[in-house]
Image (cartoon, rainbow, N blue to C red):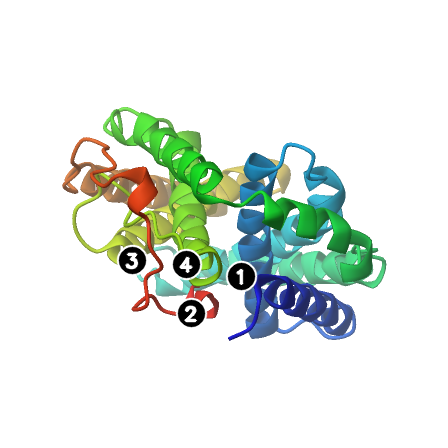
């Protein structure tokens, strides 16, 4: 089995390679894989930041954050086009016109991403190795327990009032769960400490993430459509059709949020002795996480 420095180095080099390739040709699948890799790297750097207060998180992630943000715009427009194509009850003329608008926006966003990718300036493994090795040395049972308990508590602050939480809190909950799941696999595999499933969530965590992901897409879609309707000239019939689509997506977003309220949650509690964490030999390799 590889060591965690080898694992991080391999992923760092893979990210740099993907950014370089995407600077020349920006394919949707490759862009998705890049974003998944960056999310995993971000989650691990956040763990290092908690374990080692001296870990240079900003230096390590600043450039990747910009790449991730520009890639996210491309992804959102692509998903919005998919959602538009699924709509059968929206005025056909508006659908065609808005689809052309999104195709143009997608091309502009993709070109903008390429420009940033070609000048990414991502820190190399050699530049970060010493800081990463220092952070790894601080990842012991007490610091890992503290990290996972803090992340769990942060998630449950939102879960406890999920019926009334804001959309921004819902997005944060999705990030917290993803970070917990990704770093749980890293911790079990490389540090021999498995904190167990995120306390308080009963049922399939992947099903929950899937539902949060669908809600996320509709929430982003109606917000972008609202901006597009305000930023571009539309004929009166097209604007009316656009408002109808906006209402449909808003209703869908609210419906999905209500479904999340019905999920079964239990009080957050680490039921095991924090000192009893052991490596989960049945856990899937971290690279299987998406």
First-in-chain label (2 vs 4): 4
- 194 and 169: which is toward the camera: 194
First-in-chain label (2 vs 3): 3
Q: Secondary structure at mark 2?
A: loop
- 276 and 245: which is toward the camera: 276
Measured in 3D between alpha carbons, the distance from the residue under mark 2 to the one under mark 3, in whole angstroms, is 16 Å
The reply to whether discs 2 and 4 touch (Cβ–Cβ < 8 Å) is yes
In the displayed structure, 136 sits above or below 281; it is: above
| Label 1 CA crowd tier, 10 Å (few <14, some 14–19, many 20+) | some
Disc 2 target residue = 285
The reply to whether discs 2 and 3 touch (Cβ–Cβ < 8 Å) is no
First-in-chain label (2 vs 1): 1
Disc 3 target residue = 206
Percent coordinates x, y for residue 153 in the rendering: 35, 30
Disc 1 target residue = 36
First-in-chain label (4 vs 1): 1
């Amino acid at each position: 089995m590889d060591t965690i420095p080898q694992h991080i180095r391999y992923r760092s080099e893979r990210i740099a390679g993907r950014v370089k390739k995407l600077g020349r040709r920006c394919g949707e699948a490759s862009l998705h894989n890049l974003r998944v890799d960056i999310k995993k790297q971000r989650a691990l750097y956040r763990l290092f930041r908690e374990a080692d207060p001296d870990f240079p998180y900003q230096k390590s992630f600043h450039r990747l954050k910009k790449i991730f943000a520009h890639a996210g715009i491309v992804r959102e427009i692509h998903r919005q086009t998919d959602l538009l194509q699924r709509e059968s009850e929206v005025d056909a003329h508006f659908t065609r016109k808005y689809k052309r608008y999104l195709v143009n926006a997608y091309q502009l966003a993709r070109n903008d991403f390429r420009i940033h990718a070609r000048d990414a300036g991502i820190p190399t493994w050699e530049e970060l190795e010493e800081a990463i090795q220092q952070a790894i040395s601080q990842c012991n049972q007490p610091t890992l327990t503290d990290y996972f308990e803090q992340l769990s508590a942060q998630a449950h602050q939102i879960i406890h009032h999920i019926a009334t939480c804001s959309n921004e809190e819902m997005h944060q909950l999705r990030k917290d769960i993803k970070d917990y799941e990704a770093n749980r696999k890293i911790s079990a595999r490389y540090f021999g400490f498995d904190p167990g499933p995120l306390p308080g969530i009963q049922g399939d965590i992947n099903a929950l993430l899937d539902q949060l992901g669908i809600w996320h897409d509709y929430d982003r879609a109606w917000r972008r459509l609202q901006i597009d309707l305000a930023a571009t000239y539309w004929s009166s019939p097209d604007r009316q059709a656009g408002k109808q689509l906006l209402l449909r997506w808003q209703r869908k977003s609210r419906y999905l949020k209500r479904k999340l309220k019905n999920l079964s949650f239990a009080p957050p509690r680490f039921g095991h002795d924090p000192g009893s964490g052991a490596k989960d030999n049945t856990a899937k390799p971290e690279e299987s996480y998406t």
